[in-house]
Image (cartoon, helix red, strand yellow):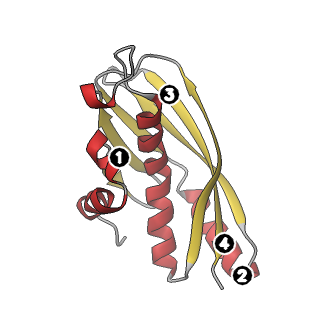
Amino acid sequence: MGVSTSKFNTFTFFKLPSAWWCGVRLRHIDKNKAIVTVTHKWFNQNPFKSMFWAVQGMAAELATGAMMIDQIKESGQNISMLVANNNASFTKKATGKITFTCEDGHLIKEAIDKTIATGEGQTIWMKSVGVNTDGVVVSTFNFEWTIRVKR
């Protein structure tokens, strides 16, 4: 695997600075799973003293997108990626350290192989679940990723 967490976090500083400044950090990545953390602080909170939903969304999206970026890079092909749709549910106030985990990396390779073989765009839905330090789910995000070989 070509992506390390430290290199990816440096990438976020330059390419996703709002996520980096809000404290979004990739903690683990492999072919099947990515873990991203973000800690509730005064600069990423909403008026209700919990983490702003968009900050949670950045962390949740990164948990899905980091694996997508890594596997596209590994394919050696020029493939574009874009979030076409997303939805989320919020079940508890997000305070403290929130850990987002996505375990849908296994879906990516098949979609990449199919877009390379057919030249047609592919879509996959990936889920990222955020839990607090007590292990309680605070939010669940679903992202519909689209990929297509650039010709």
Q: Distance between the residues labelled 2 and 3?
A: 36 Å
Q: How far apart are marks 3 and 1 (CA)?
A: 17 Å
User: Left or right of 127: which side holds 74?
Assistant: left
Decide which of tag 4 and tag 2 comes sooner along the chain. 2
Mark 4 in CB contact with mark 3 (< 8 angstroms): no
Q: Is mark 2 on a helix, strand or loop?
A: helix
The amino acid on which the numbered mark 3 sits, given as a three-letter code, is Ser
User: For mark 2, what is the residue?
Assistant: 117
Q: Element under label 4?
A: strand
* The quadrant where residue 133 appears: top left
Front label number (2 vs 1): 1
The CA span between labels 4 and 2 is 11 Å
Of callouts 2 and 1, the N-terminal one:
1
The residue depicted at 69 percent of the width and 74 percent of the height is 115
**Quadrant of the rendered structure where residue 42 is?**
top left
Label 2: how many residues lie within 10 Å, few (<14), some (14-19) or many (20+)? few
Residue 30 located left or right of residue 83 = left
Could you classify mark 1 by the number of other residues whose Cα lies within 10 Å: few (under 14), some (14-19), or many (20 or more)? many
Tell me the kind of residue under disc 4: Arg
Towards the viewer: 48 or 138: 48
Q: Quadrant of the C terminus?
A: bottom right
Residue for badge 1: 19
Q: Earlier in the sequence, mark 2 or mark 3?
A: 2
Where is residue 64 shown, x and y percent of the image?
50, 51
Quadrant placement of the N terminus = bottom left
Return the residue at label 4. Answer: 148
| Residue 70 against residue 149 in the figure, above or below | above
Residue at 28% x, 23% y: name it: 96
19 or 111: nearer the eye?
Answer: 19
Secondary structure of residue under mark 1: helix
